[in-house]
Image: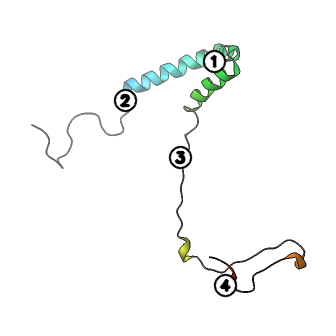
């Protein structure tokens, strides 16, 4: 018989308890890499530059976090029609509209 919805969980691992096998495997791989650093560097140096970059790129994903795409939306219809112009030239060369009607918003 299955547990009814909303009933407390019984048995199993407590929340937050690490998986022993995963932890053991991570330790094994970390020790393997650590014990063979010099050989790994030698092996990398024997690769062609393109191959070496491919290996380093694959390894970076375990060290550097992947960047997420960021997007922003903005409703420009609520913006003021006021415009500040900063002109850094000769005043006689500046051309400014004489009224708001000459600017297409």
Q: Nearer the viewer, residue 3 or 67?
A: 67
x and y percentages locating residue 22 in the rendered image: 41, 26
x and y percentages locating residue 40 in the rendered image: 63, 16
Q: Which residue is mark 4?
A: 101
Badge 4 or badge 3: first in the primary sequence: 3
Q: Which residue is mark 2?
A: 19
Q: Which residue is mark 3?
A: 68
Q: Of discs 1 and 2, which sits in the foreground?
A: 1
Badge 2 or badge 3: first in the primary sequence: 2
In space, the residues marked 1 and 4 are separated at their CA atoms by: 70 Å
Badge 2 or badge 4: first in the primary sequence: 2
Badge 1 or badge 4: first in the primary sequence: 1
Q: Is residue 51 left or right of residue 24?
A: right
Above/below status of 2 relative to 31: below
x and y percentages locating residue 32 in the rendered image: 54, 16
Which residue in the rendered view is the most extreme toward the left? 1
Instruction: Tell me the SS state at disc 4.
Output: helix
Residues marked 2 and 4 touching at CB (< 8 Å): no
Q: Of discs 4 and 3, which sits in the foreground?
A: 4
Q: Which residue is mark 1?
A: 37
Badge 1 or badge 3: first in the primary sequence: 1
x and y percentages locating residue 69 in the rendered image: 54, 48
Residue drawn at x 29%, y 34% as measured from the top left: 13
In space, the residues marked 2 and 3 are separated at their CA atoms by: 28 Å
Neighbor class of circle 3 (other Cα within 10 Å; few <14, some 14-19, many 20+) is few
Residue drawn at x 56%, y 44% as measured from the top left: 67
Residue drawn at x 43%, y 22% as measured from the top left: 24
Above/below status of 44 relative to 80: above
Badge 1 or badge 2: first in the primary sequence: 2
In space, the residues marked 4 and 3 are separated at their CA atoms by: 42 Å
Q: Which mark is residue 65?
A: none
Instruction: Tell me the SS state at disc 1.
Output: helix
């Amino acid at each position: 018989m299955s547990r009814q919805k909303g009933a407390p969980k019984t048995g199993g691992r407590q929340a937050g308890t690490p998986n022993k096998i995963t932890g053991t495997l991570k330790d094994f791989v970390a020790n393997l890499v650590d014990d063979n650093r010099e050989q790994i560097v030698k092996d990398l140096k024997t690769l062609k530059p393109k191959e070496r970059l491919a290996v380093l790129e694959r390894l970076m994903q375990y060290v550097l976090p992947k960047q997420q795409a960021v997007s922003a939306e903005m409703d420009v219809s609520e913006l003021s029609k006021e415009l500040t112009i900063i002109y850094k030239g000769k005043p006689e060369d500046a051309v400014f509209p004489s009224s708001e009607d000459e600017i297409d918003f």
